[in-house]
Amino acid sequence: MPLVTTTEMFKKAYEGGYAIGAFNVNNMEIVQGITEACREEKSPVILQVSKGARAYANHTYLVKLVEAAVAECPEIPIALHLDHGPDFETCKSCIDGGFTSVMIDASSMSFEDNIAVTKKVVEYAHDHGVVVEAELGTLAGIEDDVKVEAHAASYTRPEEVEEFVAKTGCDSLAIAIGTSHGAYKFTAAQCTRNEQGILVPPPLRFDVLEEVSKRLPGFPIVLHGSSSVPQNYVKMINENGGKMPDAVGIPEEELRHAAQLSVCKINIDSDLRLAMTGTIRAFFNEHPDKFDPREYLKPARANIKDLVRHKLVNVLGCAGKA
Ligand code: G3H
Ligand code: 13P
Ligand code: ZN
């Protein structure tokens, strides 16, 4: 099947109590690792491209890589989504350039300005058969070149969501309930430590999610910053010359719970980066004489595939839903 929008995916996910994984893609091996897992698990998927990915790999290369995945996996629905579109022009460029979904992230603007720019993107996107994700509330962490300190982050205010969705016409809404971008989601001071000395993050604000869902019945909610920062890969990185102390993510049980509620899209990027980097670091430590990129990218791609499979089956619940 050709690239699809997320409309049908989200409808089924909402009704079925699962979420679609939205994985960031930056190169061929990442596209292949994700989509091979999705094809084998018969899972719908969203491949998303950030402003940084477009700057790194070039819009056309990324679109063509995703089109190749669509050709290789004709039996699963694949959506191509712009992650954190910073302005109307970037969204327009992706809409004109083959994307089926865009995010306009005006969450750092005032409520009124966020509505105005989101509405403008929605009008253009809907005229071209493309769907729009918007955001209310501010996540902590780093996305593209924007760094939001934990103290500057703010939870979504449920009392704003009905007016926002009604005035903008957006198709899905990203909310802030305590997730955060990157591999260092929480400071040690925000966490407790378990018996193994591993940091345990503060729980997500499910009360905010429930209040939002009550006000927007049937409406798809999106969670950004939802990597779980697998400790086996943090250890692999640290044991092979890396230095990532106290990297901590969102517990997978919390994401599984969110997927059973109104959350239809869960964004995962950092976990794939950790798997890729850990694998490549370990490879070079074991084989200091090797220099063929195919030899170290092959196990990195295989570990991305395994990790995505785990997410589809055990976290998102979307395996078998294609
Ligand atoms: O939220 C941001 C995504 O993880 C993309 O990251 O801007 O480094 O491509 P990036
Ligand atoms: P992570 O950094 O937790 O993987 O979040 C990715 C994301 O939200 C992309 O938009
Ligand atoms: Zn994000």
Image: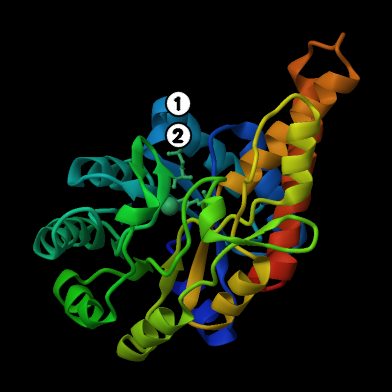
- The quadrant of the picture occupied by the N terminus is bottom right
- Residue at the (65%, 39%) spot, across then down: 245
- The answer to whether one can see residue 185 in this image is yes
Count residues near mark 2 (Cα–Cα under 10 Å), then give few for <14, some for 14-19, many for 20+: some
Which mark is on residue 232? none
Question: Is the residue marked 2 within 8 Å of ligand 1, measured from its CB?
Answer: yes
The amino acid beneath tag 2 is: Ala
Q: Is mark 1 on a helix, strand or loop?
A: helix
Rendering coords of residue 107 (x, y %): 25, 57
Question: Quadrant location of ligand 1?
Answer: top left
Q: Toward which corner of the image does residue 276 lie, by quadrant?
A: top right
Which mark is on residue 56? 1
- Residue at the (79%, 63%) spot, across then down: 195
- Residue at the (18%, 69%) spot, across then down: 168
Rendering coords of residue 52 (x, y %): 41, 33
Q: Toward which corner of the image does residue 17 lie, by quadrant?
A: bottom right
Q: What element carries label 2?
A: helix
- Residue at the (53%, 86%) spot, across then down: 15
Count residues near mark 1 (Cα–Cα under 10 Å), then give few for <14, some for 14-19, many for 20+: few
The reply to whether the C-beta atoms of the residues labelled 1 and 2 are less than 8 Å apart is yes
- The answer to whether one can see residue 268 in this image is no
- Residue that carries the numbered disc 2 in the rendered image: 53
Q: In this view, does 136 lie to the left or right of 322?
A: left
The residue lying toward the viewer, choosing from 281 and 16, is 281
